[in-house]
Image: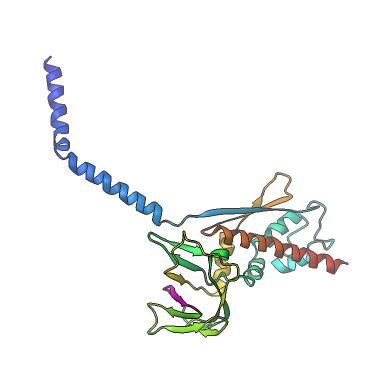
């Protein structure tokens, strides 16, 4: 009996200080819950997109026979031997194919719409305009802050925390920014959505070389099957439409390389 009493007393003494402050624990749990909800809503969603490429007659192709000569030249893979599948993977991982793809897209100037908790990247049907980079200013310092875009009819007002004054322009007009000469073009594919707040739009900028490196690093290339005839391409992007566009353009560019190779052979 004495032992039971001692245990009961010890337990009360141990829990007593915490039970007296139960309100603080409830408040802490409530605060942590709010913090968790804010973190989830403020973190951008990342989407995984992937596609597969079938390499026909991969085992029969030979570098000595000239089957991959053009691909080697594009990807700088001369001397890799006769296993063609390694050459094909190398082409997809090369800087050359990513450069050719990015020349067709406006990936240097991603556009965003600021929401309550985070920002959403606008691309394709969700972006009201396109920004074409006409010429980079090589000696200029790259911007560290985003560029705000306000649109009033055909009038476009650009501003940044790094600039002393605003820059006004319009569509289809070459506009000189501190870091590049650009042109804004209305996006004919744009579809307005009531789910996205478009009051605060901005874009960021990076030079072409850095953008190529960024996309090259984001691309994952591996074999899908044990036979080694199917190559899988995948990326993790904030915008699903942009991810699909990038992968589709990679496959299209790869096929163009292959067609050029066959034309040279014939």
Question: Which quarter of the rendering shows the C terminus?
Answer: bottom right
- Say above or below: 173 vs 263: below
Residue 89, horizontal then vertical, whole percent: 68, 57
Residue 176, horizontal then vertical, whole percent: 51, 85
Q: In which quarter of the view is residue 102 placed? A: bottom right
Colouring scheme applied when the structure was drawn: rainbow
- Say above or below: 26 vs 47: above
Name the residue rendered at 35%, 49% in the picture.
36
Q: Looking at the image, which is closer to me, 3 or 122?
A: 122
Name the residue rendered at 14%, 33% in the picture.
16
Q: Looking at the image, which is closer to me, 54 or 71?
A: 54
Q: Magenta span covers which residues? A: 143-153
Q: Is residue 177 visible?
A: no
User: Is residue 167 left or right of 232 when viewed as pictured?
Assistant: left
Q: Is residue 20 visible?
A: yes
Q: In which quarter of the view is residue 100 placed? A: bottom right
């Amino acid at each position: 009996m004495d032992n039971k009493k001692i245990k009961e007393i010890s337990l009360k003494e141990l829990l007593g200080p915490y039970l007296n402050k139960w309100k603080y624990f409830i408040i802490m749990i409530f605060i942590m819950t709010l913090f968790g909800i804010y973190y989830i809503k403020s973190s951008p969603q990342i989407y995984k997109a992937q596609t597969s490429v079938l390499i026909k007659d991969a085992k029969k192709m030979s570098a000595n026979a000239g089957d991959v000569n053009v691909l080697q030249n594009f990807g700088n893979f001369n001397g890799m031997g006769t296993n063609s599948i390694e050459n094909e993977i190398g082409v997809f991982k090369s800087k050359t194919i990513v450069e050719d793809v990015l020349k067709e897209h406006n990936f240097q100037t991603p556009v965003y719409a600021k929401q309550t908790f985070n920002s959403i990247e606008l691309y394709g049907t969700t972006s009201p305009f396109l920004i074409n980079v006409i010429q980079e200013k090589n000696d200029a310092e790259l911007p560290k802050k985003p560029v705000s875009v306000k649109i009033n009819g055909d009038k476009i007002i650009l501003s940044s925390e790094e600039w002393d004054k605003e820059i006004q322009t319009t569509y289809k007009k070459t506009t000189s920014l501190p870091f590049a000469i650009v042109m804004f073009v209305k996006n004919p594919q744009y579809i307005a959505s009531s789910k996205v707040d478009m009051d605060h739009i901005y874009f960021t900028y990076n030079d072409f070389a850095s953008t190529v490196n960024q996309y090259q690093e984001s691309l994952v290339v591996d074999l899908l099957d044990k036979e080694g005839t199917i190559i899988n391409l995948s990326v993790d992007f904030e915008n699903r439409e942009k991810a699909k566009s990038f992968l589709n353009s990679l496959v299209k560019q790869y096929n163009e390389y292959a067609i050029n190779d066959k034309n040279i052979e014939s």
